Image (cartoon, rainbow, N blue to C red):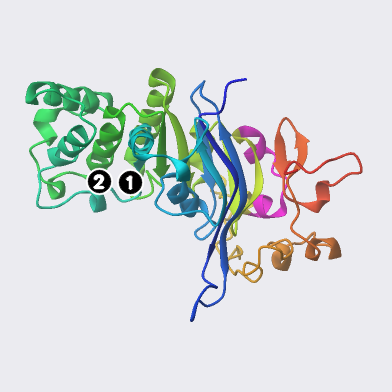
Amino acid sequence: MTAPLLEIRNATKVYGGSGIGGGKKVVALQDFNLSIAESPATITTIAGESGSGKTTLASLVLGFLHLTSGDVIYRGVNIQSMNAEQRVHYRREVQAVFQDPYEVYNPFYRVKHIFELAIRKFKLANDKAQARQMMEDALKVVGLRGGEVLEKYPHQLSGGQRQRMMIARAYMLKPRIIVADEPVSMIDASLRAMILDIMLHLRDDFGISFLYITHDLSTAYQIGNDIHIMYQGRVAENGDTGHVIENPKHPYVQLLLNSIPVPDPDVKWDTNLNLPSEEEMRNSPKSGCRFYPRCGSRMDRCLQGIPPLFPIENQHQASCFLYETPESSPASK
């Protein structure tokens, strides 16, 4: 059996609580598991509200943060134990596209600088002509031309152009995975479809998988193969994107999806919906279900421990004791 391209095992990240003045512990991510196959390429969505742990997960995969416990394994090698050569290879094959592309650019350099840095770092070209061709080829994939953008400064480009430039830079390195952290949240609606189409193009035509971080379930539904919906550092529900969004099981996910307005002018959208934002039960990894204070289906059992992911159907899982049966075995075991 072929090893997964990327495997995350029981990933946990806890902030604070150590040393003098460490303060209370905050469990940013707890016991997260994920597997992305070598092929076919897929778009795996990590969805949730602000503070749910999705960006912490992205930072752990990219090596910006160290796990408190658990493992991130790429092609059979734990990224924390990689040697220098393996780490360079990993950084080339696992690329990132961030929420605000403007922050990635140095305003004192022309935008071609971000391409030239990558080419030098990974020794991709033998001369300037080859380097220029690589830039042009990458820009063509995202619908841009070098003569129009490479000599400009960041402030001379639109937000959509800057974001496409970052995708082109990532593509130029021929990665296997792109971690896309809210890539369409800071561009207007008219450009979002273009960015999403580019992601689908890279998946389907170039075999590049995506770890798509978002709070927008509508875009997740449009392009995602699988989805993991997070709540306060844990997976509330996961599975095939269509199954989860069309037939949500976890009370939190049901509430979240019910808050999305329907496209009907006769149906009033309740803008006063009180989505949970407090973190009453996040200070301990062993506390009960974190959605308990706001759940309409809560039981005493929910305070005795965190519910594991229970299997429902078609690899659809929900972290809720409502789906515990005598026959069911926790998916996390």
Q: Which residues are magenta?
A: 242-255
Between 119 and 261, the one nearer to me in the picture: 119
Residue in view at x 38 percent, y 20 percent: 206
Position of 66 relative to 85 (above/below): below
| Crowd class of label 2 (few under 14; some 14 to 19; many from 20; radius 10 Å) | some
- Cα separation, mark 1 vs mark 2, equals 9 Å
Position of 316 relative to 24 (above/below): above
Look at the numbered disc 1 and give the secondary structure of its residue: loop
Type of residue at label 2?
Gly
Q: Disc 2 marks which residue?
A: 159
Look at the numbered disc 2 and give the secondary structure of its residue: helix
Residue 318 pos. (x, y %): 72, 45
Q: Is any atom of residue 12 visible in this view? A: yes
The answer to whether the residue labelled 1 contacts the one labelled 2, judged by CB atoms less than 8 Å apart, is yes
Relative horizontal placement of residue 124, taking residue 49 as reference (left or right): left
Residue in view at x 26 percent, y 32 percent: 168
Q: Quadrant of residue 269?
A: bottom right
Residue 252 part of the magenta-drawn span: yes
Relative horizontal placement of residue 257, taking residue 201 as reference (left or right): right
Q: Which mark, by number, is residue 188? A: 1
Q: Quadrant of residue 227?
A: top right
Between 151 and 242, the one nearer to me in the picture: 151
| Crowd class of label 1 (few under 14; some 14 to 19; many from 20; radius 10 Å) | few
Q: Which mark, by number, is residue 332? A: none
Relative horizontal placement of residue 210, taking residue 122 as reference (left or right): right
**In which quadrant will I find the N terminus?**
top right
Residue 5 pos. (x, y %): 50, 29
Position of 132 relative to 153 (above/below): above
Magenta: main secondary structure equals helix
**In which quadrant will I find the C terminus?**
top right
Type of residue at label 1?
Asp
Residue 4 pos. (x, y %): 55, 28
